[in-house]
């Protein structure tokens, strides 16, 4: 590698380019990719680094996202530090193989620019694609802006290899992936040292210690595999906390499993994740200036979901509203469902809102209306749709 | 719509392929180099060459947290006057706010098309200036010069420096300097 960045740099990048910059510094061994529509600037940026000789990565171009994930599984099982990126229909096409990556405990890092799913055809920002993968056994980390995309990419790589689970680092499609924002990158050396060298505990190419990956597991053993996998992904939360603490010591930027914003004495709290959090913070500040006791809980770690910690934050609130950017057809929206599960042991009014599907605009005034509903004590059943046309 | 009035907001109206996204990013980068906070993002419609596009820029002295689209800009920039037929480019541009239009038409003609517009209208034949300086209808460079003449949101030198940084490797020194001249002509235009 040449032209190393020896200093922190304040630069303006799209969220996708911020991910690519972090990936350059991580210098993965293998990146199987299928960058076709819905394309993002992630692989575009990273492939340029590879073409310019700035990474040692072998990029494998394949014929579909299903193949990209399959190749990632092969590379990771062989002992290579492996990354890929996708979005929308591409993630949906990967679905079958996502489970193989997690069940085989392969530390693949995947950047996802979260977007809507067809039909009807739409490739705009939305959380439907990543919500479709929420039970696939991958760790899922949401990012608010380009700055967090960069940081989460570095944290996600280290976490994957530490806990031996695949990790999805998620940014909002377009709003984050294609918007130029300011971030501060770390020196190459700091990132290199932070993620360290990848030493897999077992690999196909470790000929002295032969192992089998992906064996048959019949009714006498499959059940226990899944029980252990379930326990292990919950345990990953503690490692995540350790890693973000280490990250704070090298970057000065501290993270938690979530970000609580003015929740301490808040009577009315909105829970949400992704890029709309920034807009919602402005609304909280404005309502606070009017003396209204409102706050915000931003979920970062969605899988494993931190039920107990979330309950601790919400237990003293009068009302909670959950804003989902996806629908779970025939059920309640996904984040709402997690919040209900978190607070089931105590009496709390939790209301459901869905916003910005398929890239529909979401304004501060829409978020303000959610707080106003809670402040007025308006109770309702089911889900309200923000900034949707009356049907 | 944006409640934080410390943020300066710009909308570029153009047709896909006219370089509004590049212009927006150069302006944002130049502002960042002056220590400001920025956001630059396109509004993605059904993108195809010639389709109307919108590109947004925010510039602020404070961190920008909102991710709303811009609906009440402080400045609207129009790279192609045929958009006036289909798009309300003057929307929410009120007194003391600016509307810059690249056009060969007279100010009177444009004012008539706009109807009861009460903001500041600045017209410039950026395409003509670009043909004379760059030799191509690259009106976006000229428009960049005009923008900072009108709103002074970044310094001319910062803009030129950023342009050189981004484009010298891509289009060569000679072409870059022609575009720099185009920026200067836009900046000096009446």
Image: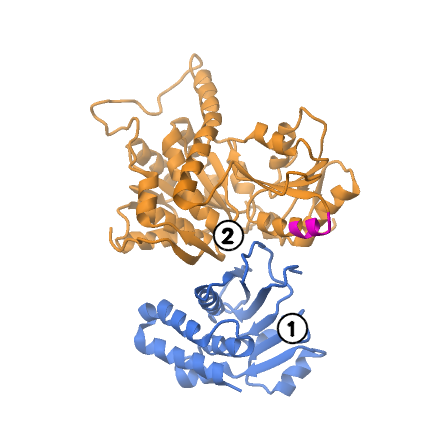
Rendered image quadrant of residue A351? top right
Q: Colour of chain A?
A: orange
Contact between labelled residues 1 and 2, with CB atoms less than 8 Å apart: no
Q: Is residue A187 above or below residue B74?
A: above
Where residue A176 is drawn, which disc sits there? 2
Residue A172 percent across, percent down from the top left: 52, 48
The x and y percentages for residue A91 are 47, 41
Q: Is residue B140 magenta?
A: no
Chain letter belonging to callout 1? B
Mark 2 is surrounded, within 10 Å at the Cα level, by few (under 14), some (14 to 19) or many (20 or more) other residues, namely many
**Predominant SS along the magenta part:** helix
Label tally: 2
Residue A41 seen: no
- Position of residue A336 measured from the top left corner of the image (x, y, whole percent): 64, 35
Q: Which disc is residue B90 wearing? A: 1
| Element class at badge 2 | loop
- What residue lies at 71% left-to-right and 39% top-to-bottom? A267
Give the Cα separation between the discs numbered 2 and 1: 27 Å
**Label 1 neighbour load within 10 Å: few <14, some 14-19, many 20+:** many
Residue at horizontal 67 percent and vertical 26 percent from the top: A344
The disc placed on residue A255 is: none
Host chain of mark 2:
A
Do badges 2 and 1 share one subunit? Answer: no
Residue B63, visible in the rendered structure: yes
Chain letter of the blue region: B
Left or right of A289: which side holds A35? Answer: left
Name the outermost residue toward the left: A208
Looking at the rendering, the stretch of residues picked out in magenta corresponds to A285-291
């Amino acid at each position: 590698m040449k032209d190393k960045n020896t200093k922190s740099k304040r630069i303006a990048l799209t969220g996708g380019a911020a991910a690519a910059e972090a990936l350059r510094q991580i210098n993965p061994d293998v990146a199987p990719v299928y960058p076709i529509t819905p394309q993002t600037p992630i692989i575009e940026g990273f492939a340029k680094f590879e073409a310019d000789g700035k990474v040692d990565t072998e990029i494998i171009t394949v014929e579909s996202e299903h193949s990209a994930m399959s190749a990632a599984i092969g590379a990771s099982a062989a002992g290579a530090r492996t990354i890929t990126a996708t979005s929308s229909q591409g993630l949906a096409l990967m679905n079958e193989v996502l489970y193989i990556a997690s069940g085989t405990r392969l530390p693949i890092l995947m950047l996802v620019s979260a977007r809507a799913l067809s039909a009807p055809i739409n490739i705009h920002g939305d959380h439907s694609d990543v919500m479709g993968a929420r039970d696939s056994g991958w760790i899922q980390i949401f990012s608010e802006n380009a700055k967090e995309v960069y940081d989460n990419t570095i944290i996600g790589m280290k976490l994957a290899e530490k806990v031996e689970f695949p990790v999805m680092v998620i940014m909002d499609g377009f709003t984050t992936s294609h918007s130029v924002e300011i971030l501060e990158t770390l020196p190459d050396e700091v990132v290199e040292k932070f993620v360290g060298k990848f030493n897999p505990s077992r690999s196909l190419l470790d000929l002295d210690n032969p192992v089998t990956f992906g064996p048959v597991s019949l009714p006498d053993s499959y059940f226990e595999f899944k029980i252990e996998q379930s326990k292990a992904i919950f345990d990953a939360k503690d490692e995540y906390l350790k890693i973000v603490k280490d990250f704070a010591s090298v970057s000065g930027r501290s993270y938690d499993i979530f970000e609580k914003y003015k929740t301490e004495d808040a009577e009315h709290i909105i829970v949400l994740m992704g890029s709309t959090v920034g807009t919602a913070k402005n609304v909280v500040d404005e309502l606070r200036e009017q003396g209204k006791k409102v706050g915000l809980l931003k979920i970062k770690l969605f899988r494993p979901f931190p039920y107990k910690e979330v309950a601790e934050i919400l237990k003293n609130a009068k009302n909670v509203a959950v804003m989902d950017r996806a629908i779970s057809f025939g059920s309640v929206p996904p984040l709402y469902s997690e919040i209900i599960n978190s607070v089931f042991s105590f009496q709390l009014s939790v209301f459901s809102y869905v916003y910005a599907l398929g890239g529909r605009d979401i304004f501060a005034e829409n978020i303000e209306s959610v707080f106003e509903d809670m402040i007025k004590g308006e109770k309702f059943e089911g889900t309200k749709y923000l900034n949707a046309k009356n049907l | 719509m944006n409640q934080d009035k410390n943020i300066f907001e710009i909308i570029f109206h153009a047709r896909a392929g006219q370089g509004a996204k590049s212009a927006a990013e150069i302006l944002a980068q130049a502002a960042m180099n002056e220590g400001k906070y920025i956001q630059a993002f396109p509004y993605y419609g059904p993108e195809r060459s010639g389709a109307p596009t919108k590109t947004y820029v925010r510039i602020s002295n404070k961190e920008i947290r909102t991710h709303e689209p811009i609906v009440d800009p402080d400045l609207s920039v129009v790279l192609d006057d045929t958009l006036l037929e289909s798009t309300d480019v003057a929307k929410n541009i009120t007194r003391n706010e600016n509307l810059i239009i690249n056009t060969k038409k007279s100010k009177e003609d444009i004012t008539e098309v706009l109807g009861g517009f009460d903001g500041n209208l600045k017209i410039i034949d950026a395409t003509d200036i670009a043909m004379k300086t760059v030799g191509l209808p690259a009106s976006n460079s000229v428009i960049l010069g005009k923008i900072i003449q009108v709103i002074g949101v970044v310094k001319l030198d910062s803009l030129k420096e950023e342009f050189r940084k981004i484009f010298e490797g891509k289009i060569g020194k000679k072409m870059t300097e022609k575009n720099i001249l185009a920026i200067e002509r836009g900046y000096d235009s009446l």
